[in-house]
Image (tube, rainbow, N blue to C red):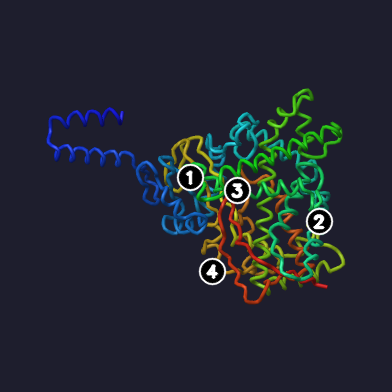
Amino acid sequence: MLFSLWTTGASLAKYIDLTTFLVITLLFLIALCVISTPRSDIPGPLAMPFVGNLMFFLRVGTKQHEEYLRLYKTYGDIFRLFFGNRMLITICGYDTICDAFVRQGSVLSDRPEGFFHPGPGYEKSAPGVLFTSGEAWKRNRRFAMQTMRDIGMGKKRMDEVIADEASVLCADIALSNGKPIDNMRDLLGMSASNIVHYVLFGYRCNHDNERFLTIIKAAETIFKSPNLRYRLLPKFVQNFLGTSPEERLRAQGDVSNYLKYQIEEHEKTFDRNNIRDLVDRFLTTIPPEEDSNQKLLRMYLMVLELFLAGTDTTATQLEWTILYMMGYPKVQERCYEEIEKVVGLNRSVSYSDRNTLPFVEAALLEVQRLSSISMSVPHVSAEDISIAGYRIPKNTMVTAFFASVHLDPKLYPNPEKFQPERFFGENYGNVNKKEMIIPFSVGPRICLGETLAKTGLFIIFANLIQKFKFCKASPDEELSFDGVTGQIRRARPYRVRAEPRN
């Protein structure tokens, strides 16, 4: 159509003078730009013809957290951005988020079609959980939840697995002998990965296991890729914002090879009457005669999603926690004193101690509040709905910005201040407003690994504080609390000294 209009215009040029032709051409281009400019009554920054808010994404880079806060302060609880002509609505504020994703969660639980590509060779993979919609999502979520419950999530056995891993982490840190540690991120990542590894594959690995280290590196590469909502942008923009497609492809290949290895090893010892982990549970649903590639396609996406989501998020949250303990040594000492008084130093801290360690819990909540590492994966509306007085058409992408809740001055006076005491009411010991810390989302799409992540975070943090005092590598080093946002918001690299408590 555009070509035919241009051809017609060129033909008219034979019969009119150049000035008139240029004026008509200019008016035509202006009209085309006006027609192509995305519109919505929902407020948001100016969108350009054809490209939408492309310049916004190029400008913010890895500062999405800070820029989204600015948009929230400018436009309020709901604003929109355009990826080309496709609109993404962002919901902010606790009440508005709950209205959208809890009260109207049944019509906001689907994912955008074509939003996630599993990579070349895996187009025929069975659907996973995170990026799946409809009945397939409900079925796979039930499958994953039941498997995790069966192998001990939320039970004493899983607490013991996490406690054992915390002990190994403490031993690794102790090897530094109080000298600066440059690779704390790697140490935390190995422990977080090992906990998820137990759920998926039935055992924990030694921290020097080469296969294990390879898959951890792959997870880190994938999570350094652009935030999921930016998958709608052109490839060159995605490359500017994170790891390259080639790096992500190699990382996905490493995950695939590791899963193939696990399937082969599980088949050698598989016992239908003794389900050890998620892979075993999958094998009960797959005909034995299927070839290995087909088995891989059946479980690839679910295992990939669970491993990646469960690994990097916990490690990142722990990384932020240690950073804040270095920055606020009085809070760290108060956590230690509470642990020493309630638990003592002769046994490890367990999850059952949580209710008797209110300040430790409050400190963790305050770190989660200020770090706000997660940004919601986009949902899509299954029908026309209304949010904050605006009509949201069917098939519109909608996401939540959790930091708008965590940094809301109406909920948390002086929200930029690190103050764990804000979670206590008149009676010390009762931790309040826990439900308003929502790093795992809300509604039907709440993270299915929430219980595992919370348990792991508490046990590992409490045992680290029981055994070490975390200090800056040198007194003159500056700590930065500015994050870097990719799939999640990570702390900037730092060095730390872990001084043994005794």
Which disc number belongs to residue 82? none
x, y (%) of residue 487?
A: 58, 50
Residue highlighted by disc 4: 414
**Along the line of sight, which residue is nearer the eye, 243 or 203?**
243
x, y (%) of residue 360?
A: 72, 65
Residue at 76% across, 60% down: 354
Residue highlighted by disc 2: 163
Distance between mark 2 and mark 1 Cα atoms? 44 Å
Q: Can you say whether 404 is above or below 258 in the image?
A: below
Secondary structure of residue under mark 4: loop
Left or right: 233 in relation to 319? left
Place residue 24 in its image quadrant: top left
Which comes before the other along the chain, label 3 or label 4? Answer: 4
Residue highlighted by disc 1: 236
Secondary structure of residue under mark 2: helix
Place residue 71 in its image quadrant: bottom left
Amino acid under disc 2: Ala
Mark 4 near mark 1, Cβ–Cβ under 8 Å?
Answer: no
- Toward the top, the furthest residue is 289
